Structures are given as structure tokens and as C-alpha cells.
Amino acid sequence: MNDRKFLLWGIPILALLVLIPRGVLHIRSVPVFFLNWGISLLFTCAFWFTGRALWRALFRRFPRVDQTRKRLWRLAVINTAIAAAVTFILDSVAAWAQGGHLDSASFWREFGLNMVPTVVIQLIYESMNFFQQWEENVRRAEQLQSAGVQSQLEALQSQLDPHFLFNSLNTLSALIEPENEPAQDFVEQLSDVYRYVLLARDRPTVPLSEELVFVDTYLALHKARFRDNLQVTIDVPSAALTRYVAPLSVQLLVENALKHNVASREFPLQLRLTADPIAGNFTVENTLRPRTSGLAPGTGTGLRNVRHRYELLHAPHPVEITAEAATFRVRLPLLK
């Protein structure tokens, strides 16, 4: 936090303001005025730097928004204790130097005046922190919305891709016959895919259970074309189904595997979807056998988008991508 301006302007002004109740306006001598102001500057600096150090220490320990009340209560208690102790010590020394003793009326008056800079300093730093958090949340919300819209657009563009429509229509034309139930199932699954895309587009996260139902429908469409050339294993414990993922993120990983790898009778594409609720991750793993012809090689834009979306969602750990000799693996963090 850059508070140089507050230090340069705030300390002299605050040091002057706390002198007003002490009768600085009635001082007629310029040297006496600057002497009092100088003494006030020393005490204001001490209060300011002590308060700032205390605020920073407590903020490091309680940084989250839901911990604000806990942080403010501790600030209030500790600052009040410090102000009371400093007031008691200084007034006792001053009374002893003048041959008198400290009375309660003087103590409470000075204590109240010393609390003014303490409260002002804490308000300044809490206000600065609140504004920064608000600004960061607004920026993060805009980035998340932008990333979500871009992901939805890419998903829609991909699913409306001529290759996908061409293959799906060919499959549909081969299936459609009078009283042909597989044809009806295929059409229903196709509509379910687009329905999920439309429903999920305005949601930052979805339950893993919903995403897997969608992915299962999406895979059923492709299995009608690939048949035994596509082998899918899904092993997800029930404890992981209530966790959340970014919508269409699992589907994008499945789509990448189908788009960029060979799936033939000789080399079937093996796709494995697993989850570990204890480690808090969901894994999409496929055999790595890139196509040598057909579609252009991937640019990695989809994976970058997925990574960025999980960063904006404050995922507990980043998206992990591993490419080994015969296996490509992407591990998504499960969100609470």
C-alpha cells in the first residue's frame, strides 16, 4: 500500500488539528506556536507509525473480507489500551514535573484527544483497504464475465463447427428410419447439449454432477460416430459430485482429446475422467496420439482460457497440464 501522500500531508495536518482543542488558536507568539506544533508532530508520528504497523500486522493475520469485524475489534481494543497507557504515562510525568499529581478529569480529557489521531489513522487505512478490495473485486468480476463469455462463445463456435455438424448430420441420416428409437435419442441428446450451453452461460460455476451429466450426453453423441473407437471410463466418487467447476471446462478438455487425437479401430482413444475429493481435483486423461492430418494443430487458446477462468475464481490451486509419452492429462481444481 503506497501511503506516502498520507504521510506527507496527513501527519502535519492531523498534528495541527489535535492542537485546536488545546488552545493553539489563542497562541500569539509564532515561536511558541511552532514549538507546540513540533511537539504535536512528534506525538502524531509516533501514533501514526504505531497504528500503521498494528493495522498491517492484523491485516496480514486477518486479510479476508469475512474477517473484517474480527480485525476491527482487535484494532479497537489494542489502540484504546495503547492510547490509555501513553496518556497515563505522559500526563503523570507532566504532573510530576510541575509538582502536582494526575487527576481523573485531566486524564480523560487528554485520553479523548489522543484517541482522535488513533481513530483517524485506522479509518484512513481501513478506507484505503476497502476501496482497493472493492476496485479489485469489480475488476475481477469484469474479467470473469469476459472470460466466461469468451469461453461460451468458443464452446458454441466449436459445437457449431462445420466438422461437428457434418458428422452429426451424417450419423443422424443413417439412423433415421420409421420407428427408429436411436434416431430419436440422438436428436434429444443433441438438443440437451445446446440447452446446457444456454443455461450455463450466465453462471460462473456449476456443480460437478451437472457438468458430468452434460459431458456424458456430449460423449454419447460422439460415441454414435466413433463407436468402439472411443473408450470412456468415468470414476467419480459421490463426495466429489457436490463440488463445483467452471461451466464447460470439463467438456472443453474432452473436446480437445477428441479433436486432436487419433481414434481408430487400431488405436482407440481412451478417455478417463476421475475425481479426488480429498485432494480437491478433477482429472481428464486421454491417450496421446496426435493426428497427423485433418484438423489444424491446436493453438492452446482453450486451455489458456480455462486456466484464466480458474484463476479468477480463486481456485485453491492452479490448473495442471501434463503431457507424457503416451498420456495427456489435465487436472482441474474442485471448487467449494
Image (tube, rainbow, N blue to C red):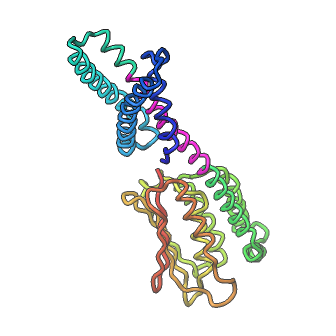
Residue 139's place in the image compared with 281, above or below, is above
Measuring from the top left, give residue 13's x and y in whole percent: 50, 31
Question: 164 or 70, which lies in front?
Answer: 70
Residue 292's place in the image compared with 324, above or below, is below
Dominant secondary-structure state across the stretch colored magenta: helix
Measuring from the top left, give residue 71's x and y in whole percent: 39, 35
Q: Report the span colored magenta.
A: 114-140
Residue 315's place in the image compared with 113, above or below, is below
Question: 60 or 298, which lies in front?
Answer: 60
- Residue located at (49% from left, 35% from top): 10
In the rendered structure, the answer to whether residue 202 lies left or right of residue 327 reads right
Question: 311 or 22, which lies in front?
Answer: 22
- Residue located at (57% from left, 42% from top): 134
Is residue 204 on the magenta stretch? no
Res. 213 image quadrant: bottom right
Measuring from the top left, give residue 127's x and y in whole percent: 51, 36
Could one spot residue 118 in this view of the protein? no
In the rendered structure, the answer to whether residue 319 lies left or right of residue 90 reads right
Could one spot residue 277 in this view of the protein? yes
- Residue located at (47% from left, 37% from top): 125
Q: How many marks?
A: 0
- Residue located at (26% from left, 10% from top): 103
Measuring from the top left, give residue 195's x and y in whole percent: 70, 56
In the rendered structure, the answer to whether residue 128 lies left or right of residue 22 reads right
Is residue 124 on the magenta stretch? yes
Residue 103's place in the image compared with 153, above or below, is above
Res. 289 image quadrant: bottom right
